[in-house]
Amino acid sequence: MRLKSFQRLALWTTATTYLLILVGGLVRASGAGLGCPDWPRCFGSWIPPASAANLPPQFDPSQFNPALMWTEYLNRLLGVTVGFLIFATAISAWRHHRQQPRILWPTIAAFLLVGFEGWLGGRVVAHELAAWIVTAHLIVAIVIVQLLLYATFVAGEAGEAGEAGEAGETGSSLAIAGLIVLTLVQAGFGTQVRGHIETALNAGVARDGALSTVGRLDYLHRDLAFVVLFGAALLTLWLLSRRSTLIRWSFVVLAFAIGQIVLGVVMAYGSLLPAAQVGHLTVASLLLGAETVLWLLSRRQST
């Protein structure tokens, strides 16, 4: 099926937002979250300074680390790019789908949320990477992706005849929605765990011992990961028994759920390997995206 101009733009925007989540994970894993200690500027300037000698007097030269500074600055530039892409997507939705509220309003909501996301980014810096704000920052990014996926999917349905529904697909739709909620909660716990780890590292705890300082929150995060895996496996078996057309995406969800746990194990027993941290966050966001697509497909078949 040939994609419409709105769908192409929305998909590119979604892909760039995923890239931003990946880069955000890299920022977190590399410790570059405060590479620029102020916001929206970086060391008081719109363009980062070339050396510590160029810092304004209100900044401590010991804060200057070129690698961390440019990592965080490029993350911010990518965030601005995503903002412009979502703005363009909203304009496209208004031009081509203004009479279709199921396309227009999710896109407008994504545009409004990206502004809120930028403000949250500033709060993350102002509160020096407080775990609860970092959690909110990640959840909002994931919600933006889900809104864009929803609008793209509905645009693909516009003007097409609906597919014949299958008995029981409404039940699968509810089960998938529950799985999405569980995964969101599990991702939220994950960012909280990471916040506690960073606190431990900043206090001088060795990397191989930082995870052990988290305590019960880490166990909740791990247990929920297995609950999500169990739910994905049950859903896949159920769809297999019914020979549902949803089975391919169900396998994608199951694969991401397994990959998420594997990367978590690598992190736990690999002294919090930064590459595993970035992969863990990226796979979590892809898992939620795959679950969203599966939910959308199940809703289409139930109509």
Image: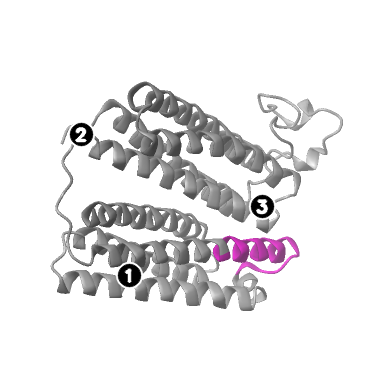
Q: Nearer the viewer, mark 2 or mark 3?
A: 2
Q: CA distance from mark 1 to mark 2?
A: 32 Å
Name the residue rendered at 66%, 52% in the picture.
Answer: 133
Image side of residue 224 versus residue 189, left or right: left
Residue type pointed to by label 1: Ala
Give percent across and percent down for residue 73.
Answer: 61, 34
> Type of residue at label 2?
Gly
Q: Quadrant of the N terminus?
A: top left
Residue placed under numbered mark 1 in the picture: 232
Q: Which of the two residues, 44 or 217, is positioned nearer the viewer here?
A: 217
x and y, in percent, of residue 141 in the image: 51, 46
Q: SS for tag 1? A: helix
Query: Looking at the image, is 188 positioned above or below residue 3?
Result: below
Mark 1 Cα-neighbour bin, 10 Å: few <14, some 14–19, many ≥20:
many
* SS of the residue under disc 3: helix
Between disc 1 and disc 2, whose residue precedes? 2
Q: Which residue is mark 2?
A: 159
Pick the residue in front: 230 or 108. Answer: 108
Mark 2, Cα crowd under 10 Å, few <14 / some 14-19 / many 20+, is few
- Pointer 3 local density, CA inside 10 Å: few below 14, some 14–19, many at least 20: many
Q: CA distance from mark 1 to mark 3?
A: 29 Å
Which circle's residue, 1 or 3, is located before the other in the chain?
3
Magenta span dominant secondary structure: helix
Vertical side of 111 occupied by 295: above or below? below
Marked residue nearer the N-terminal end (2 or 3): 3
Q: Nearer the viewer, residue 64 or 230?
A: 230
The residue indicated by pointer 3 is 133
Indicate whether 129 appears above or below 5.
below
Q: Position of residue 160 (x, y in %)?
A: 18, 38
Horizontal arrangement in the rendering, residue 267 relative to residue 3 (left or right): right
Amino acid type, callout 3? Ile
Q: Which residues are magenta?
A: 189-207
